[in-house]
Every structure is written in structure tokens, then in C-alpha cells.
Image (tube, grey):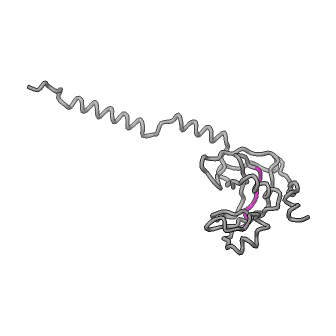
Amino acid sequence: MSEEEKCQSPTRHEVWHAEEQGMPANGDRIMILKKQWLDMILSGCKTIELRGQTAKSGPVWLGNEQKLHGRARIQRSQRLTYPQLVELQQQHRVPPTTLPYPKTYALYLENVRPLKHRIPFWHPRGAIGWVRYRNTQQAAATAAAKRTRKAPHEDHVHSRAKEIVRTNNLARPFPTALK
């Protein structure tokens, strides 16, 4: 099978069923990917992800559009030069016109496993590239609590201001008409 056919074929990896896949724990790393790159990783034709910073080896969830689609292990991270980028093009699939980042790192992925059932996660506004897992229901509850809760010092500040006004009003003599 050619490299091109590999990318067009259905997923080569065994799909995890719910009882096998497990659930992410709060704080687990999620690599955020565009759909086209995620599909290539899950199909097995893309084994290197390019990033602008290094990443620690270890397990990582693969996410897109607030859903986890798979899991992988980052085997290692390596800073790339332009000749290395060209040499590894069949593994990362990015057209090698120039280095995509001032410091470009190859994250070598292994043990890629697509999930049979997508798992929703909370993606904080503005977060790019990486997030930590938080269940969507927990995140919504936390956000709602923050909206209804006052800052801890807020009541103290208001009561202290009222006390100052009260004290100052009593301490100052009542203004008398000027003669």
C-alpha cells in the first residue's frame, strides 16, 4: 500500500470501545488539532506533529472542536532544521516550503488509538495548541458559580467604606452658616 493510499484508507488502528478507552482525568493534556491533521494522525499516515514548542513525552488526548477523538503517546520531541523538515515530510505531511515556526519541533507520536465514542471537553476561550482536560459539566458549573459569587474582599471593602463615611459624618461638626 502506498503512502497516499494509507492516508485515504479507513483507520488502520484498532478502535477503543468505551470500556477500554477509559475516561480522561482532570488535568490530562489535550493536543488541539485541525480536523485534517487529526484525521491523518488517527489513520496512521501522519506520525509526527509539528509544533512551535517542545512537549514532554507521555500520554496525550487528541482533540478537535471540544471533543476528544483519540489518544496517543508522545514518544519524544526534537527540534528540526530545514533539511530535517524536508527529510521527514512523509511523516508530518506539511509542505516543506519553510520552517512553520521560528523554533520548529517534531513530536513523534506512537500508540495512536481512535475513540469509538467522542468525549466532550471544555476548551477555554483563546486557548491554542494545548489545553488541560476539564469535563464540560464541571466547567459550566464553575463558570456559573464565578458569575454569582462576589470577590472575597468585596463585602469587606463596601462595609469598610460605609464605616468610614459614618465615622466621618459623626466626627465632623455640622456645617454652620457662614456669618
Q: Is residue 24 left or right of residue 144?
A: right
Tell me where residue 14 appears, x and y as whole percent: 86, 55
Most distant residue in the bottom direction: 83
Q: Is residue 99 above or below residue 35?
A: below
Which quadrant holds residue 79? bottom right
Q: Is residue 173 left or right of residue 54?
A: left
Which residue is rendered at x = 82% and y = 61% of the image? Answer: 45
Most distant residue in the front direction: 97
Which residue is rendered at x = 60% and y = 46% of the image? Answer: 125
Tell me where residue 26 appears, x and y as whole percent: 66, 49
Most distant residue in the right direction: 1
Which quadrant holds residue 177? top left
Front-lying residue, 136 or 44: 44
Tell me where residue 57 appears, x and y as whole percent: 69, 64
Which residue is rendered at x = 86% and y = 62% of the image? Answer: 4
Q: Is residue 158 above or below residue 133?
A: above
Magenta segment boundaries in residue numbering: 69-75
Question: Magenta span has 79?
Answer: no
